[in-house]
Amino acid sequence: MSLYHQQFTPNQKWLLIGLTACAFLLRLHRLDVQSLWFDEAFSAFIGSSPPDAAIQSMLEEGLQHSPLYYLLLRPFATNGFSEFSLRFLSVAAGVLTIPLMAQMGRIAAKAQVGLLAAVLLTVNPFHIWYSQEARMYTLVIVSALGAMFFFSRNLRRPRWQNWLGLAIFTIIGLNTHYFAFFIPLIQFIFIVATLKQNYRLLRPWLATQLLAGLSILPWLIIILRWGKFYFGSAALQPPTGFDLLQTLWNFSLGYTVELTLYVGLMLALFLLLFVRGINAARRTGTGLLLILWGLTPPLLAFLMSFRLPMYVDRYISLALPAFLLLVVLGFYEWQPQKVGQRVLAGIILGAMLAGLWRVYYDTEVYNRADWRSLGAYLEENTGPGDVIALWKYQTLLSLFFYYQGSQPLKPVMIGPQVILPALPASAGAYKVWLVLDHPNNSTHQAGHCQDFSLPALRLPAAFQEWLSKNQNRLVEVKEFSCVRLQIYE
């Protein structure tokens, strides 16, 4: 099945150009409809801050923040930036993955595999959602595809150009997100597993990884001088076996929360194709690489999370291309009649397009905190002497880009310190506008908030007591997407 020398025909090249253009339009559609949520606001803050302040903030937030994405974001985060400009870098990276996916499929199997995989990636709901988020995840996918592409070329024809390409894309990954270390790990496992055939690649590969590792040395020196070592993660608890199913759910249909009969049938179909793809890949020259690429990030992250919870779908998004490639290999392995093959292809694409519709229009699932509307409401309705209280310090950063009023923003919690807002002695003197974020649930759910629940917020005891004591002073509650505003007087 491996046809390394097979090239795209002129018609296939035109199709790939059309797919890339389509991917660009799909990722631009409704790009700035939702306001920035906290992680995106953090990106905006780092990208627009002076270098010293940016480095300090990255270190304080955790070692998961490598500098490359924020450096690339700086031209898009200048004065007067918008949601559109901040997210455009992710759009560009997401679009670049389409031709890379096609080339990876061609070199791993054949041109048709690469084109169909590129089609699936073009409309993939999970990929489009993160192509429209001002974060680094599509850049990590670019680095994974590029590194695996040039590594695969070296399996057939080792050349210095291929080693250089491998080094460049590995450097991009290592300097973008700490989960990109899976890329060289997968390649190392592959070389060791096939050492008899690929022993000649070990030395140049190690030299390439040394070069890539040297690129992060300045950042490691900064971290060592900082002297504090902390890895942040959106995961709150160790995963269960159901988390692996939810990852499959995200990578294929886009997460829908409710496991309906339709969702169950579609997941069974994708899982069947994935398993068939693994079986088919075992007979190709680079098949083991695809299998390791598709399985190592989720399985190893799953096991590591019992020590430190870090199983989050967007962290392991670098495995998405391998998953789709294996699904396509399973599709061609099935080999039904031509009519049946078209029906199966239609079902797969239809399921993804349905998921894509939800990304654009289902704000119950795909939602970001509406800081834009909240900021405008506060500007219009707060008066002199009013207090705008934010229950945690991070909320200050999220609202900062949208609220331009004259009343100061005062966090209730600054680290372990709790500063409770003072209510007026008499009603009508002034108001306290308390801003409470909805609980965050971003392990699988692309929309990063869930239904409001005070217990889920894990408020400190003193703050809970304040809320209970002043319940009679609560005069109004307003709901925005993922944010609740409680007004006291």
Image (spheres, helix red, strand yellow):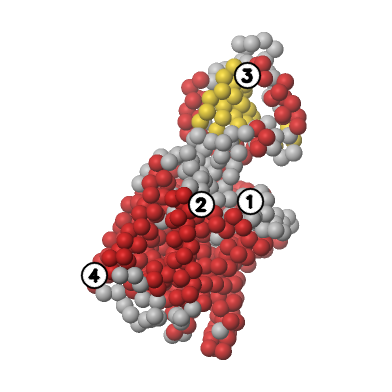
Q: Which one is earlier in the sequence, the residue at label 1 or at label 2?
A: 2
In percent of the image, x 73 and y 34: which residue is there?
Answer: 460
Instruction: Check the image and report above or below for 269 versus 27.
Output: below
Name the amino acid type tagged 1: Ala
Disc nearest the viewer among 2 and 3 = 3
Circle 2: element type: loop
Locate residue 196, reporting x and y percent: 56, 89
* On-image quarter of the C terminus: top right
Residue topped by disc 2: 135
Task: Tell me if 176 is positioned left or right of 415 in this view.
Answer: left
Q: CA distance from mark 1 to mark 4?
A: 45 Å
Name the amino acid type tagged 3: Leu
Residue topped by disc 3: 474
* On-image quarter of the N terminus: bottom left
Residue topped by disc 1: 235
Quadrant of residue 417 in the image?
top right
Name the amino acid type tagged 2: Arg
Q: CA distance from mark 2 to mark 4?
A: 35 Å
Specify few, some or many for label 3: CA neighbours under 10 Å numbering under 14, 14-19, or 20 or more. some
Locate residue 144, reporting x and y percent: 49, 67
Q: Is residue 82 visible?
A: no
Instruction: Identify the disc placed on residue 11.
Output: 4
Locate residue 437, reporting x and y percent: 59, 35
In the image, farthest residue toward the left: 11
Q: CA distance from mark 4 to mark 3?
A: 66 Å
Circle 1: element type: loop
